[in-house]
Structure formats: C-alpha cells, structure tokens
C-alpha cells in the first residue's frame, strides 16, 4: 500500500512532486533554509554528558555520528532524560542506548516540497551532503556529512518570513 501512496513515493525519491497547485516555496532547495551547523555527538558520549551538552548549547536534539562519518541516529534531550529517570539507562551508559536509529535524510539540493512530505510523518530530518573521500592508497568512497537538522518549525519559519504577499 505504501507503494501507491504518493507522499511515501516522494519521501523515498520515486516521485518528484504530486501537487498540481504547489505553494510558492514547493520547489525551493533545502539549502535556502540557511540552518546553522549542527552539534553532533560521538557514540561513546555518556547519557549524562549528552544531557549536559544539549542543555548548555540550547539544543533539543543532536545527530550521533561515528568517527568514520556514519550517521547512527538522533538523540533527543527529552528521550534521554525520560530513559534515565525511568531507570531504563544509567547516566554512565553511552548515548547510543537512547539513540533513535530510524530517521529521514534529505539533501541540500532537495526541495522544500519533499521536506514537507517527510515532516508530515517525522519530527525532523537530517540534512546530509555526500562527499567523495580518498584514502592513502588512492581508493575512494562516498562519505555523508551532516549539514543540519531541520524541523517543521524551521520550514514554517522560512515560509512565514518569506511569504509572498
């Protein structure tokens, strides 16, 4: 059934767009949101340290990224706090114990329309950019870099600030 769902098809890159009467912002690229660079956490950061960092820096969430650049998921302040308070994890446990590993990725060149479809079901999307990286022997591989985290509030703020009157 999801294969005949147009929103699922857009979110997963099988359709470009479905709206006949698209809003003015539909085809604008995600990079126009001008989001600030995200704070990322390495997987070995403890839950206590993650809470401290997020509170000190004023973030609600942060991607968890391995040293290799592999995006492992997203940690949220509320989930980390509730998991610790419920006794499901210890303050000393690594943040990977409270990391959401299901998340949507979107590229800088993707449209705000595609982002809108993602945000209908997800609380956030991780903005990624692929970069070719070479190692010492000359072989290459594609590495994903986290460029930002975008929420529905970010999209709404952009649309309201730039609304065509």
Image (tube, rainbow, N blue to C red):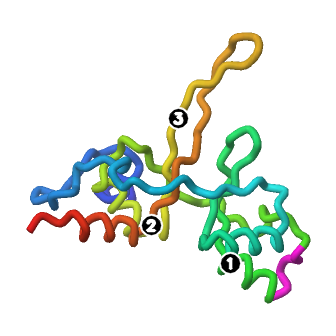
Q: Residue at x 54, y 53 (%)?
A: 37
Secondary element type, mark 3 = strand
Residue at 53 percent across and 34 percent down: it is 130
Tell me if 77 is positioned left or right of 46 in this view: left
Image coords of residue 133 (percent x, y): 63, 24
Give the labeled residue for mark 3. Answer: 130
Between discs 3 and 1, the one toward the N terminus: 1
If you read the primary sequence from the N terminus, does the residue marked by circle 3 or circle 2 appear first?
A: 3
Among the 4 quarters of the image, the one containing residue 101:
bottom right
Label 1 packing within 10 angstroms: few (<14), some (14-19), many (20+) = some
Check contact, mark 3 vs mark 2: CB within 8 A.
no
Q: CA distance from mark 2 to mark 1?
A: 17 Å
Q: Which residue is mark 2?
A: 151
According to the picture, the residue beneath numbered tag 1 turns out to be: 79
Q: What percent of the width, then of the height, locates residue 35? A: 44, 56
Q: Is residue 156 above or below residue 28?
A: below
């Amino acid at each position: 059934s999801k294969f005949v769902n147009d929103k699922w098809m857009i979110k997963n890159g099988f359709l470009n767009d479905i709206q006949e009467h698209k809003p003015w912002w539909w085809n604008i690229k995600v990079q126009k949101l001008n989001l600030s660079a995200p704070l990322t956490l390495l997987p070995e950061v403890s839950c206590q340290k993650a809470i401290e960092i997020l509170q000190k820096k004023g973030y609600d969430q942060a991607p968890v990224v391995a040293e290799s650049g592999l995006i492992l998921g997203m940690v949220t302040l509320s989930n980390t706090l509730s998991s610790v308070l419920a006794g499901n994890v210890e303050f000393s446990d690594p943040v990977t114990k409270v990391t959401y590993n299901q998340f949507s990725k979107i590229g800088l060149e993707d449209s705000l329309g595609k982002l809108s479809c993602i945000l209908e079901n997800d609380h956030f999307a991780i903005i990624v950019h692929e970069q070719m990286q070479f190692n010492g022997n000359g072989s290459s591989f594609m590495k994903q870099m986290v460029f930002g985290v975008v929420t529905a509030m970010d999209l709404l703020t952009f649309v309201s600030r730039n609304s065509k009157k």
